Image: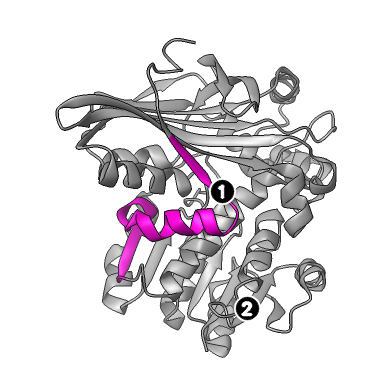
Amino acid sequence: MKKVIIIGAGGVGGVVAHKCAQLPEVFEEIVLASRTQSKCDQIAAQIGKDHLRTAQVDADNVEELTALLKVEKPFMVINVALPYQDLHIMDACLNAGVHYLDTANYEPPEEAKFEYKWQWAYQDKFKQAGLMALLGSGFDPGVTGVYTAYAAKHHFDEIETLDIVDVNGGNHGHPFATNFNPEINIREVTAECRHWENGKFVGTPAMSENLSFTCPEGVGTYSIYRMYHEELESLTKHFPTIKKAQFWMSFSENYLKHLEVLGNIGMTSIEPVNFEGREIVPLQFLKALLPDPASLGPRTKGRTCIGNIIRGTKDGKEKLYYVYNICDHEACYAEVQSQAISYTTGVPAMIGAKMMMEGKWMQPGVWNIEQMDPDPFMDDLNRYGLPWTEIELGSHPLENG
């Protein structure tokens, strides 16, 4: 019997648990674990399946997590906890002989730094243990990497430019909230922007470059801002013909104004301050004040549109290609009681785990998702809730808009 342990009971963890529970022929036994077991119990009650159990574990405590893994003996761990915990969970998987998957790269708690170097350094450890670690099996990173690999396999001889565009056209009605973990979200948005150009990363101030982008299928026109995102590092490594790679995300004026004010008064800082005799991190305190992203599901309306615009050559001719997914917030809530941001991350995590459980993706070592065969994953995106559309473009929408 193949068992999986899901670590993390936030919005994404809830989606992963729902989607895994829908496939008992693959995920025969599921354990949902978190520091706060009551959150796991609440998700389990929503799902109501006998093959789903819950457990309490502190993922920062390698010994405690190792002990749980040795008792449960799962085939693999799906890590949807905080990115700070990635290395601890990888260590526990090595200790217990368990395969590993995550959706976001490791971030050191004390610094807003997004790099794969810490996890790539585990390559030999996992290979020698005969274990697989799959990195970045969310949407971005995740599906965006699979989109790139699929385009390279089927549509291009060489990829020259890559623009990943992530638009959230949803409205949750709060004056200010984040669609996923506030601490991680705000760290990413306020970090220095970097994009890939002519063989190196070029730094620019956060949110200093923006364009107007019109999504297909009537989703709407939005302001998108260039920012750094971790898949740029792995994609430019694994597709070395790429001359320029950029990541764009939509933000409303309201969101940016709130963020500017919070930054000006120090609330987005990750530097500890002394408050009434104890140290607190302002951003962590702000997180406690903001709405829980998992609570946004029932009140969020609208659609997301996330995809890759890729330019390159095929058979000596230039080609411009766009592959994307559109996801409806209300439809996601109707299915798994989640808004679309958690859904678009949780579904690919389930599919990546399914690829490993079925042996379609299984090789010892540490791998980014774009290094795997994209075809079975792309098939499952259509099958399990994230259908994609591909079109050829006549002109580049970010160069003519």
Magenta-span inclusion, residue 61: no
Residue 295 point in image, percent of width and height? 82, 49
Picture residue at 53% right of the left edge, 14% below the top: 211
Left-right relation of 126 to 344:
left
Instruction: Compare marks 1 and 2 and give the one earlier in the sequence.
Output: 2
Q: Amino acid at mark 1?
A: Pro
Is residue 381 shown to the viewer in this render? Answer: yes
Tell me the element at label 2: strand
| Magenta segment | 363-390
Picture residue at 41% right of the left edge, 42% below the top: 231
Q: Does residue 228 sit above or below 379 in this rendering?
A: above
Label 2 environment density (alpha carbons within 10 Å; few <14, some 14–19, many ≥20): many
Is residue 277 shown to the viewer in this render? Answer: no
Residue 156 point in image, percent of width and height? 24, 37
Tell me the element at label 1: loop
Picture residue at 66% right of the left edge, 50% below the top: 342
- Residue under label 1, please give it: 109
Tell me, for residue 30, which label it has, or none.
Answer: 2
Magenta-span inclusion, residue 371: yes
Picture residue at 85% right of the left edge, 33% below the top: 174
Left-right relation of 106 to 33:
left
Q: Quadrant of residue 163?
A: top left
